[in-house]
Image (spheres, coloured by chain):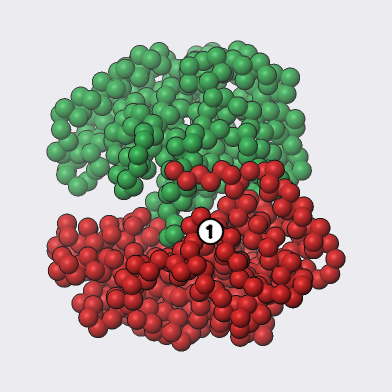
Chain colours: A red, B green
Amino acid sequence: MLCEDAFRRPDGGAKLAQAIREMTADGAPVRLMEICGTHTMAIAKAGLRPMLAPGVKLLSGPGCPVCVTPAGAIDEILRISALPGVTVASYGDLLRVPGSVRGDTLLRRKALGADVLTVYSPIEAVEAAAAYPDRQVVFLGVGFETTAPGTAACVLEAARLNLDNFSVLCLLKTTEPALRCLLADPDTAIDGLICPGHVAAITGADAFGFLPREYGLPAVVSGFEPGDILYAVYRLVPMVKTGRPGLENEYTRLVQNSGNAAARQAVEAVFRPTASLWRGLGEVPDSGLELREEYARWDAARKFGFAPSPSAEAPGCRCGEVIRGVCTPRDCPLFGKVCTPSDPVGPCMVSGEGACAAAFRYGAE
Amino acid sequence: MDEIITLDYGSGGLRTAGLIDSMLVPALRNEALEALGDGAVVPFSGDQLVFSTDSFVVTPWKFPGGDIGKLAVCGTVNDLCMAGGDPKYLSLSLIIEEGFALEDLRTVIDSVAKTARLAGVQVVTGDTKVVERGKGDCIYINTAGVGTLRTPGLSRSAIREGDAVLLSGSAGCHGTAVLMARGEIPCEGTLLSDCAPLRALSAAALDAGRVRILRDPTRGGVATTLNEFVEGGSLTIDLEEDAIPVDPPVAAACELLGIDPLYAACEGRMLAIVAPESADAVLAAMRAVPGGEGAARIGRVGSARPGQVVLHTALGGSRILGKLTGMQLPRIC
């Protein structure tokens, strides 16, 4: 199995960190954004921030699938979970996310009698639908390009089995439109991006070429071991310092420049782009995926309705700004006081990949 | 919104602790309970008795390396041992769901008998209840146990700066093995639960030197148990990531499941805080006992960050290792 020990070895990591500190000893701090929640967690877990401070400031972006799902969408999920005969199948992360009413979560609904199935892979939801023909199984399709192919495969499988009791509530989002929206915001001050290796495995590293080309921002596609991330920073800093932005793929052991064509074809066959509501960013055109007409039978939004209220966010919660890298978790007045992992207000504190949870759990900045 | 019990309350993490502190202790207040040890130490006929109870609801009831019968004996025996006791007698209460195969029940009882012999305890009383189909999950077991006090004075308040932190073997084996046994993840190789009685191991440690406190890191794992040692006090536990034993199959499985082995339950491991001058002797004694071969010194007690557990990573970074807040849930990607 992939333990990737070579990328965790302390000797190499310490040398990279030392080299980065030397390169950034003078001048303004280099502000780098990691746009993937798995990176956020890996950075906090390995304690990388203090190793690179003060010359490098690592900011978290809108890459945690739970965090960017707005409270209004969670409200709708909770409503659907309470419908008679419905089984909601979800990844574990979503179970603790509150909707607009604090403490109202799928976990609580489950305790009150809702049928909630935690799945590791979306295909388990299709299997559940096949096994329980009298239940309506609704799979909560959240995530980015990484989880979209698996979700598409489920729809294709349900179509093959002619299952009428399976549907997908499609909350899938795509990275590029959100990044463009973020970079158009004058509040966003970043010098370079650590790009998500898992997304790039599907889209191809080349999909991030627009960052240097159109925005003049250096970008490195990175894996998730501490050594990967340190190396990505090590490659980004000189590009920032010399003002010569480019795109590099550090994660060549998994990511090809052209990505995974078969996975993209499955996504293309089942979904089409649509406007999507993001926490922190609002509605972003063409940044979500919805089921095509041919697959409308498996669309939970058409079966059960889906009308998230845009104004359902908790008062005082700054998750929206944390997601855009405008503020850090500790800048939020609720952080650690009113909002903790055991009683979260905002999704950044709930999700295993949320910036606030990372800051709280690991004592990071 | 009315607070209700969710699965998080049974995770052994923050919610469980909150329930104990806000409801159970205030309602039942007494000196033995308030020590909040794995087992209570109570006076009895001029002697000191160690007393503990535990309920077992594991799904599936049979997993690689054990079953609910073995677990039910180990759990209570280990609680008694961790409190400094010599376990003597157990009770056994069975709550069985209608439809459970008699053959399977025999397997469970055989395993209770075998583990009790191994742990040197007798099951002297018991109870059997059957509930309707759908009102239980195959079988639940409660055991309670008593023993004599072997080593008095084991407590958080005995911990001093400079003490050594010892762990008897790989973290996270039981919790990970059970997750894998649920069959949701296809996985090659065998991952065995560490479920085992700790009687010989704890006796060896207690006889070898000055032990401050013992605890078996069950629910909430190594990280949560270490937090319980220092929370609210003036001491820190500094852990060296490199020094913490995690078997490669456990590390790989945890990676796949998106969980942290330091928060996964152990059912046959022991954490010991030991006076610095006794550390080598206690470690050697633990390693000499079957099941303790993989024992390691994983950190020391300091004072830099009062009340916290700090993990020093292999790369030279550091981070806080908090308590488990609720069930560990697998991640999206």
The residue under the point 49% across, 41% down is: B251
Q: Quadrant of residue A60?
A: bottom right
The residue under the point 60% across, 77% down is: A211
Spot occupied by residue B165 in the image (x, y as percentages of width and height): 65, 30
Tell which residue pokes out farthest to the right in this image. Answer: A26
Figure check: B333 above or below A174: above
Figure check: B171 above or below A200: above
What kind of element bears circle 1?
A: loop
Say if residue B181 shows up in the picture.
yes
Spot occupied by residue A288 in the image (x, y as percentages of width and height): 41, 79
Identify the chain of the residue marked 1, using the numbered disc in the image: A
To which residue does mark 1 refer? A252
Figure check: B104 above or below A316: above
Specify the quadrant that holds the N terminus of chain A: top left
The residue under the point 23% across, 77% down is: A295
Specify the quadrant that holds the C terminus of chain A: bottom right
Q: Amino acid at mark 1?
A: Thr
Spot occupied by residue A283 in the image (x, y as percentages of width and height): 48, 85
The foreground one among A243 and B54 is A243
The foreground one among A9 and A151 is A9
